[in-house]
Image: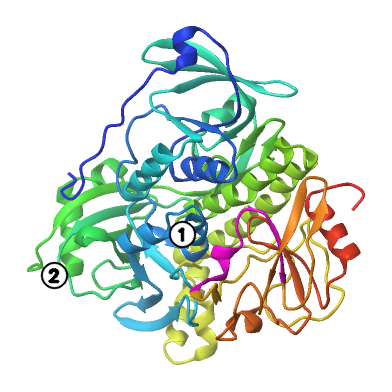
Amino acid sequence: MLHTYTYPQYAYRQSDEQREGRRVRYPVVVIGAGPVGMTQALDCAFRGIPTVVLDDNNTVSVGSRAVCYAKRPLEIWDRLGLGDDLVAQGVQWKVGKVFFRDELVYQFDLLPEEHHKMPAMINLQQYYLEERLVRACDESPRVDLRWKHKVLAVEPQSDHVVLTVETPDGIFKMEASWLIACDGASSDTRRMIGADFIGQFFQDRFLIADVVMKADFPTERWFWFDPPFHRHQSVLLHKQCDNVWRIDFQLGWDADPNEEKKPERVIPRIQAMLGPDVPFELEWVSVYQFACRRIDRFRHGRVIFAGDAAHQVSPFGARGANSGVQDCDNLSWKLKAVLEGDAPESLLDTYHDERAFAADDNILNSTRSTDFITPKSRTSLRLRNAVLELARTEPFARPLVNSGRLSTPTPYVHSPLNTPDTEPFAGRMAPGTNCADAPIERDGRPGWLLNQLGDGFVLLSFGPAEPVRVGGVEARVLQVGRDLIDRAGVLAERYDGQPGTVYLIRPDQYVAARWRRFDRAAATVALARALSHANA
């Protein structure tokens, strides 16, 4: 049915170890070459860790699938050298509008302030994203991406994992010091090790229709409750690349998925929405049911879970793939520190502490959105409709409208890696928060703060400071006014950068600690704590 995209077929290659009958142990093996698996491999490679990626297929995702990518994942991909390409190809947007029946009742702006390198959101079909990630993996000397490699068995040992892998040339065994399962919501790895995956399935179904058309809709997210063209249900409209528009129709639990995917059922729905005279072509159609659930522990010994293999949310709010990319960002630097002997294995337990906390936050927000969009009783429907009616004229009701709270990073407010504040600060940059970007100058050239933070610990200082070291890990100094020029004053404003202020920033660009003046002893203790050393 696709008119705008031709699927690539990637070549299977037999590995040297299988050809020669050798069993090789790799530092990291990733299962699954989706957006999360490939991002994980690229982030490990960025930090110097050779990584093997195994996938049982040899192409990219079928259909547009995840299409909305938020500012924080874009910043992560930008650190990996992909941000500019993805933003250039994607459709940028930041305004969302909510309609009740045929009237606009509420609108929001995801990024009302200026001075950020990455946009609030882009829409990009998942197959385009994956194609770009494949190219990056192929270009990286530290990523070995292997197609048509199906994992049949996972055998965790005390200091490694043994994998049984099937290829077109037969079956062989390989080993991983650490195995990262990014093999999706139906993860075979999760089943093989017996991990629990609990949560809630929602008794509703939605139709995705990707439609090729030249329409004059603005580049915004439009959501309708009970529109005239689809009464008593909801509809979502997004623009993607190549004049492809994503339309989601709520169907109800009684809908037959097989029947609803037929063109003779889909086309009349779209014609009712667009009008009978608007030409369009169906690009891709799917019917989905959704769930909100997560794994019991993100780390099971030497097996670590990320993305949909670790957590699932409903699609409202674009929290699935965006959260999975942030899993990778959290995990890679910790793996590097453990592999190099600079941190104890307990540092990897904080991956669960932080990312399970984020998953629970996403599940909570996603569940609330789903309950608002698909009321489960007449009482909740009346309440929902009353909120929408009030939102037309009453500002207090508009924040209560919930058509999907769009993905934002979850601060790790309870992380054991944080050093609590001892003095008051203004603004949002508390320990456990991802760093806000800001325009800077360096060596006479304009740039952005996040691009200067690199792949290690940093002391961002607004006054004199010196590097500190714990074992083999050093926190280098970036001094505002010496190394970075804050000509617009945005950096000082966002970080409450009074003279002398110092921030300790982690390798994943999260704040670990901050002080009003540099103290070598305090900074050293905070660095040790951020590496999970027990005596910190």
Q: How many marks?
A: 2
Q: Position of residue 227 (x, y in %)?
A: 30, 72
Type of amino acid at the residue the image marks with label 2: Gly
Please tell me whether residue 178 is drawn above or below residue 368 in the rendered image.
above
What range of the chain is rendered magenta? 446-460
Q: Nearer the viewer, residue 386 or 151?
A: 151
CA–CA distance between discs 2 and 1? 28 Å
Ranked by sequence position, the earlier of labels 2 and 1 is 2
Instruction: Kindly identify which residue carries mark 2.
Output: 275
Q: How is the image coloured?
A: rainbow
Looking at the rendered structure, the secondary structure element under dot 2 is loop
Looking at the image, residue 121 sits to the left or right of residue 209; the answer is: right
Residue 377 appears in the figure: no
- List the residue tagged with mark 1: 318
Q: Residue at horizontal 63%, vertical 65%?
A: 434
Residue 509: name its quadrant.
bottom right
Q: Residue drawn at (55%, 59%), measured in percent from left and top? A: 367
Amino acid at dot 1: Ala
Label 1's element? loop
Whether residue 459 is in magenta: the answer is yes
In the image, 194 versus 116, the foreground residue is 116
Q: Is residue 306 magenta?
A: no
- The one nearer the camera, 73 or 199, is 73
Residue 150 drawn at (x, y percent): 45, 22
Disc 2 crowd rating (10 Å Cα; few below 14, some 14-19, many 20+) is few
- Residue 463 as seen in the image, left or right of residue 26: right
Callout 1 crowding tier (Cα within 10 Å): few <14, some 14–19, many ≥20: many
Image location of residue 30, percent across then percent down: 53, 33
